[in-house]
């Protein structure tokens, strides 16, 4: 991809992010201004006058809602967010060990926090994985492919676990799905993603294509970077052969997923919102899975629209401004740890790397 194509790809996604944020803020602010001014007077306003009134009355009301959060709830949400990062580090170390890497807790924590920092502005909520893969590859001079695969597998397992978690939480929310058409539509998307991800994990870890099609590996080698793809696939097979690896990582991921929901639950209670915990256990995984798609930087705009789209409905009854505030406060917890990651990146980015001469050795020159 040329530099121009990369710039264009990034530019339109940033523009989409700003458009989505502008849309949701404009929609919320218009409703707030209409309520404050009164429907009868509001109807006499022209569109420019309505827009001006929205941005005069809306931001102060949003700020007022944001500052309603109790300090204790905000602090606890930040702690819970940090706990999810630590559990993610533990899961990645489990993945690394299958490939024979024994990175210390300190080093994996450094890399993970740097990746979380880059997640703040790269595409989706997984953009920092590119940096994570880069640093993981720098930890070895003869198993770079396997190091990169560990990052990819860790992310896939995390997404798969969240999809399974969200799918399971639909069962106690069936009555809500019948009356909440927006949530029901997204539930079908989550189920489709879950089926696709399950199939992908099954093929990557345990194979099956080459047994039904003898020329599959030949075709794979002929693809661009075919040798790298085949080596990556062989690395993935190792995870399928490791006893209890999938069950252990899924178990840890389910705990991580529950804490993600608890973070939002704590914030909702801190704002005084009456949202059933059972409802949040299906809404939050749905939002996380969709905002993880590489659509906008850090999922901004997508996540905020989803919070309002699902919570500010009669079936749940959360005011639009409160739903937007809940999304922004949840992101604030993530942003706090991103800033910590930024400090780690600035202070420790040169530590623990192999010598540059060894890093530049191609994998083929090293006997594995």
Image (cartoon, rainbow, N blue to C red):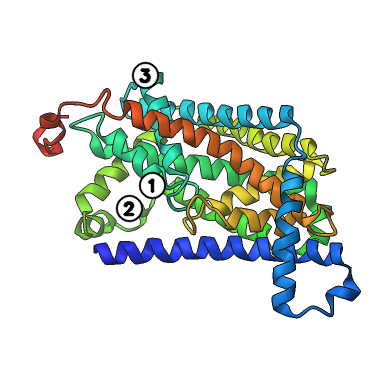
Instruction: Check residue 351 in the rendering and tell me which mark sits there, or answer none.
Output: none
Residue at 61% in and 34% down:
254
Query: Circle 1 — which element?
Result: loop
Q: Residues within 10 Å of mark 2 (few under 14, many from 20)?
A: few
Q: Earlier in the sequence, mark 3 or mark 2?
A: 3
Q: Are marks 3 and 1 in contact (CB under 8 Å)?
A: no
Residue ID for mark 1:
207
Q: Quadrant of residue 184?
A: bottom right
Query: Circle 2 — which element?
Result: helix
Q: Are marks 1 and 2 in contact (CB under 8 Å)?
A: yes
Residue at 32% in and 58% down:
213
Residue at 34% in and 22% down:
103
Whether 30 is drawn above or below 252: the answer is: below
Query: How far is the residue under mark 1 from the one under mark 2?
Result: 7 Å
The residue mark sitting in front, 3 or 2, is: 3
Residue ID for mark 3:
104
Instruction: Check residue 210 in the rendering and tell me which mark sits there, or answer none.
Output: 2
Could you tell whether 20 is left or right of 112 in the image? right
Residue 182, given in percent of the width and then of the height, sits at 73, 63
Query: Circle 3 — which element?
Result: loop
Residue 156, given in percent of the width and then of the height, sits at 46, 44
Q: Are marks 3 and 2 in contact (CB under 8 Å)?
A: no
Q: Is residue 300 visible?
A: yes
């Amino acid at each position: 991809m040329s530099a121009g194509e990369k710039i264009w790809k990034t530019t339109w996604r940033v523009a989409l992010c700003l458009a989505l944020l502008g849309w949701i803020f404009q929609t919320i602010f218009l409703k707030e201004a209409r309520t404050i001014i009164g429907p009868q007077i509001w109807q006499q306003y022209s569109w420019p006058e309505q827009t001006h009134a929205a941005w005069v009355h809306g931001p102060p009301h949003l700020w007022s809602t944001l500052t309603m959060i109790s300090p204790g709830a905000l602090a606890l949400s930040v702690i819970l967010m940090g706990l999810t990062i630590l559990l993610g580090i533990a899961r990645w170390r489990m993945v690394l060990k299958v490939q024979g890497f024994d990175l210390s807790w300190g080093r994996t924590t450094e890399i993970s926090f740097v990746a979380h920092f880059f997640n703040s502005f790269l595409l989706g909520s997984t953009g920092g994985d590119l940096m994570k893969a880069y640093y993981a590859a720098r930890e070895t001079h003869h198993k770079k492919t396997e190091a990169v695969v560990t990052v990819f597998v860790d992310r896939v397992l995390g997404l798969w676990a969240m999809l399974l978690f969200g799918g399971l939480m639909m069962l106690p929310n069936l009555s809500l799905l019948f009356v909440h058409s927006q949530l029901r539509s997204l539930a079908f998307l989550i189920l489709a993603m879950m089926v696709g991800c399950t199939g992908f994990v099954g093929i990557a870890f345990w194979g099956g294509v080459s047994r039904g099609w003898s020329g599959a590996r030949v075709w794979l080698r002929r693809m661009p970077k075919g040798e790298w793809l085949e080596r990556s696939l062989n690395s993935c097979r190792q995870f399928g052969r490791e006893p209890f690896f999938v069950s252990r990582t899924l178990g840890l991921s389910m705990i991580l997923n529950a804490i993600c929901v608890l973070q939002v639950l704590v914030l909702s209670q801190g704002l005084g919102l009456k949202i059933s915990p059972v409802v949040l256990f299906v809404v939050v995984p749905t939002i996380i899975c969709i905002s993880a798609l590489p659509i906008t930087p850090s999922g901004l705009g997508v996540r905020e629209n989803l919070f309002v789209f699902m919570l500010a409905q009669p079936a749940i009854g959360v005011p639009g401004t409160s739903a937007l505030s809940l999304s922004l406060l949840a992101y604030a917890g993530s942003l706090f740890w991103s800033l910590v990651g930024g400090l780690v990146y600035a202070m420790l980015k040169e530590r623990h790397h192999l010598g540059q001469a060894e890093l530049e050795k191609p994998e083929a020159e090293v006997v594995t």
